[in-house]
């Protein structure tokens, strides 16, 4: 009896500690850091050390997977080509890259450090072959396309790009239309990423055998080059057994001509065989114009099939059109891809996602509205993207994870399930902390977290706990439902309140997301209405 009593007392004493461990707590992190593998002057150790000093506890590296442009002349595009490459994971070595980051993670058990990649899955060339000869083979050539830090002086004027393409020469389009990939465990998962520069995926079809067309031509030429040496006059050996038959001059001339023509066939046959290898063509290449969303959906499906996570990077990109030596590099905003593609994990709302995509009624709200109406299989989440190479601004843009335990599994689960928010601002000024953003679930009798769905009966009860650093400016806190601002308040300090909204509808779903002055963006909490009245 005494042992049982002691056990109960110990359990009672430990219960508060266990409950604390079950509580979600905000853990700051940074996504899209670059290292020496991708051209940064810093090693992974140096980058992680800077992140730690900035207070980050989750670090995700996203060096460029490939960083190469290539142009080949038809019909021997794989032989008569010029390419230019800069720092990338594929050039550095996938195995080495993963090994360095995983070893770094083991050395820092109080942090979560993950490898990932920035993947430019597709680009294409616009222009003519004559432009290739003039531009690509020039002294500067392709090298300027990959040069870092293109300044404002190289940016083409607002209306210059409307000039005829022939006046502009050769142009590479959508080279910086990127996605962020993480959560892949195997080196082969990276090696086989479907990208134009990686020449994957290959189309394994019977039509690929047509690329073997030089082979019969080569065999025919070899047969003509080495004919069987039969006697032209076999009957002479019968009448005069000791006679040496001679080949007429005309036959010798024909043989020499056959050999010359065979050599003329052998050379191009071998060239085309080498050019066509491995005979099966990639599904997409850079020579057949814009392929729309298809190459990006291919990458999304590939990553999902291997259990990874994938985010659109900088959908509201402002790079525009740049003069890169004698050529143009063009990547225009691609926020429509948020609607055109499906089953990706999310997008970077900061720093290049709040010009249109993350605003009320923007692309993100349209995607979320499609989800609650049943027109989309899964929602998408907002993250903060740093795109850091060097400098003292490593904490400027953060993704804050709501975690119960600081480990890889819980961190990936938070990303996958939407238990995150993005925040941006000066790296030297403390940022507001969103402790709670929840909706009361009347069915389960608990508070639903970001990314979860609450069953709502009657009033919608929304709990917000926001910690704002002392001396902060007045900020506008607002709630957004299906693209509309339905509640807002100016806050000057910390804010804790349960907000009640009188909104119901016929059976269906809606969502609420939180926006603090367009500098802190919380992911949505969904509401399900089992019964109700029409929306007000």
Image: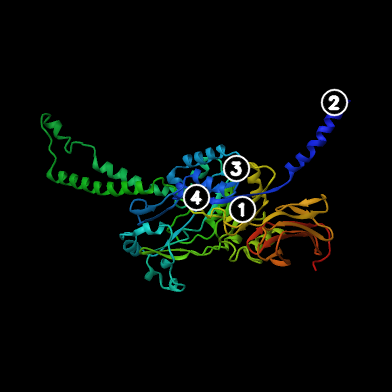
Secondary element under disc 3, as helix, strand or loop, is loop
Callout 4 crowding tier (Cα within 10 Å): few <14, some 14–19, many ≥20: many
* Whether residue 482 can be seen here: no
Numbered disc in front, either 3 or 1: 3
* Residue 399: mark: 1
Q: Residues within 10 Å of mark 2 (few under 14, many from 20)?
A: few
* Mark 3 vs 4, N-terminal side: 4
Locate the C terminus and report the quarter of the image it occupies: bottom right
Q: Which badge, 3 or 1, comes first in the chain's sequence? A: 3
Secondary structure at badge 4 equals loop
Q: Seen in the image, is 393 located left or right of residue 407? A: left
Q: Residues within 10 Å of mark 1 (few under 14, many from 20)?
A: many
Q: CA distance from mark 3 to mark 4?
A: 17 Å
Residue 3: numbered disc: 2
Label 3 to label 1: alpha-carbon separation: 14 Å
Residue 243 appears in view: yes
Residue shown at 61%/40% (left/top)?
110
Foreground residue, 305 or 43? 43
CA separation, marks 4 and 1? Answer: 16 Å
Question: Could you tell me if the residues under marks 4 and 1 are in contact, i.e. CB atoms within 8 Å?
Answer: no
Q: Is 31 on the left or on the right of 469, as rendered?
A: left
Q: Nearer the viewer, residue 110 or 272?
A: 110
Number of the label disc, if any, that sits on residue 111: 3
Nearest to the observer: residue 145 or residue 227: 145
């Amino acid at each position: 009896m005494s042992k049982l009593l002691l056990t109960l007392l110990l359990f009672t004493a430990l219960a508060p500690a266990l409950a604390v461990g079950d509580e979600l707590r905000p853990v700051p992190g940074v996504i899209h850091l670059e290292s020496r593998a991708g051209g940064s002057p810093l090693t992974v150790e140096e980058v992680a050390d800077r992140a730690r000093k900035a207070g980050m506890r989750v670090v995700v590296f996203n060096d460029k997977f490939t960083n190469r442009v290539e142009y080949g002349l038809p019909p021997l595009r794989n032989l008569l080509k010029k390419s230019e490459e800069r720092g990338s994971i594929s050039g550095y070595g996938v195995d080495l890259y993963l090994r360095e980051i995983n070893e770094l993670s083991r050395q820092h058990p109080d942090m979560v450090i993950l490898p990932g990649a920035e993947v430019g899955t597709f680009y294409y060339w616009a222009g003519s072959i004559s432009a290739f000869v003039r531009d690509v083979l020039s002294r500067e050539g392709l090298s300027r396309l990959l040069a870092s830090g293109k300044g404002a002086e190289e940016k083409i004027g607002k209306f210059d790009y409307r000039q005829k393409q022939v006046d502009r020469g050769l142009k590479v389009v959508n080279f910086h239309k990127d996605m962020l990939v993480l959560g892949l465990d195997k080196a082969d998962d990276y090696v086989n990423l479907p990208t134009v520069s990686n020449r994957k995926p290959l189309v394994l079809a019977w039509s690929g055998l047509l690329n073997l067309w030089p082979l019969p031509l080569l065999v025919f030429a070899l047969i003509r080059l080495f004919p069987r040496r039969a006697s032209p006059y076999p009957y002479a050996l019968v009448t005069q057994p000791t006679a040496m038959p001679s080949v007429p001059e005309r036959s010798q001339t024909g043989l020499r001509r056959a050999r010359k023509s065979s050599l003329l066939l052998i050379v191009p046959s071998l060239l085309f065989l080498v050019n066509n290898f491995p005979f099966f063509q990639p599904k997409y290449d850079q020579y057949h114009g814009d392929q729309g969303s298809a190459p990006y959906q291919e990458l999304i499906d590939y990553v999902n099939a291997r259990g990874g996570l994938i985010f659109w990077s900088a959908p509201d990109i402002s790079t525009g059109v740049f003069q890169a030596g004698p050529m143009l590099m063009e990547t225009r905003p691609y926020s429509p891809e948020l609607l055109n593609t499906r089953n990706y994990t999310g997008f970077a709302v900061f720093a290049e996602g709040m010009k249109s995509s993350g605003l009320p009624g923007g692309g993100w709200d349209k995607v979320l509205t499609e989800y609650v109406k049943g027109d989309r299989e899964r929602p998408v989440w907002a993250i903060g993207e740093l795109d850091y190479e060097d400098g003292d601004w490593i904490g400027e843009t953060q993704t804050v994870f709501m975690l119960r335990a600081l480990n890889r599994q819980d961190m990936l689960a938070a990303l996958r399930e939407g238990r995150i928010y993005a925040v941006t601002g000066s790296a030297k000024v403390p940022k507001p902390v969103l402790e709670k953003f929840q909706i009361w679930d009347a069915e389960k009798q608990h508070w639903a977290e970001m990314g979860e769905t609450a069953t709502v009966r009657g009033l919608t009860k929304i709990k917000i706990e926001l910690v704002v650093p002392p001396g902060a400016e007045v900020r506008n806190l607002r709630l957004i439902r299906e693209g509309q601002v339905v509640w807002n308040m100016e806050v000057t300090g910390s804010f804790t309140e349960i907000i009640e909204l009188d909104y119901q509808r016929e059976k269906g779903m809606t969502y609420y997301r939180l926006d603090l002055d367009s500098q802190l963006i919380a992911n949505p909490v969904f509401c399900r209405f089992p019964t109700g009245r029409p929306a007000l």
